[in-house]
Amino acid sequence: MTGLRDGGGVFARVLAVAAATSLLSGCTGLLATTSIEPYTKFRDSRDGLELLAEAYCRDKRGAGDRIPVYLFTTDGCSRWPDDGYAACCVVHDIAYWCGGSADDRKEADQWLERCVDERCPGLSGLMYLGVRLGGMPWLPAPWRWGYGWEWPQGYESALPRRSVSAILEGLQVRSQVEQQLQSGSGAR
Ligand SMILES: [Ca+2]
């Protein structure tokens, strides 16, 4: 347990540094927000993201394999301050919900870093470090790798499946997430 506590302390420090850095770089305000509305307000957006997550996961795991036992949910950028890159975090959540091998997780984290870097270069490296430390599959946290499965799902063996980024690109997951996050304004 000491290791877990130490890991949590490091994670907290990384978060504090990230918040300070993002403030200094003008990427975010003082309040941490999760701009994933209309996800929690509108059924259509929530259903759209669930279907998108399932499509990604069926593609990732291959026909005939199971998909997670829990429906897809997202908390946006978890406890990170977020300003304009919530879609990056939701896409990253889709990959985390589905799970897979250690290499898949690293690829998803690298994808997140690139995505956030487009909007907020001062934060992307620290966010990468944060998800590497805080997203391990054996941590009983709701944002862990493979969180769509019963804990502990752990890492799965690497099978000759398509890469995370190839599937994200093939299904245009990021632009579809952005559309879902914007669609609620028209539904009001
Ligand atoms: Ca998240």
Image (tube, rainbow, N blue to C red):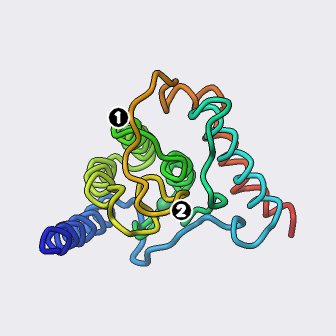
Quadrant of the image occupied by residue 75: bottom right
- Which circle marks residue 49 in the picture? none
Residue 157 place in picture, x, y as percent: 39, 35
Residue indicated by mark 2: 76
- Relative height, residue 1 to residue 180 (above, below): below
Q: Nearer the viewer, mark 2 or mark 1?
A: 1
Residue indicated by mark 1: 103
Amino acid residing under circle 2: Gly
Residue 160 place in picture, x, y as percent: 46, 21
Q: Residues within 10 Å of mark 2 (few under 14, many from 20)?
A: many
- Relative height, residue 91 to residue 79 (above, below): above
Q: What residue is shown at x 51% (from left), y 48% (from top)? A: 88
Q: Quick one: label 2 or label 1, which is nearer the N terminus?
A: 2
* Kind of element beneath mark 2: loop
Distance between the Cα atoms at labels 2 and 1? 23 Å
* Kind of element beneath mark 1: helix
The C terminus, quarter of image = bottom right
Which residue is at the front of the view, 111 or 188? 111
Residue 148 place in picture, x, y as percent: 55, 57
Q: What residue is shown at x 49% (from left), y 59% (from top)? A: 147
Marks 2,1: beta carbons within 8 A: no
Q: Is mark 1 within 8 Å of ligand 1?
A: no
Q: What residue is shown at x 70% (from left), y 45% (from top)? A: 52
Q: Is mark 2 within 8 Å of ligand 1?
A: yes
Could you tell me if residue 83 is visible in this image? Answer: no
The N terminus, quarter of image = bottom left
Could you tell me if residue 40 is visible in this image? Answer: yes
Q: Residue furthest right?
A: 187
Q: What residue is shown at x 43% (from left), y 54% (from top)? A: 153
Amino acid residing under circle 1: Asp
Q: Is residue 145 left or right of residue 12?
A: right
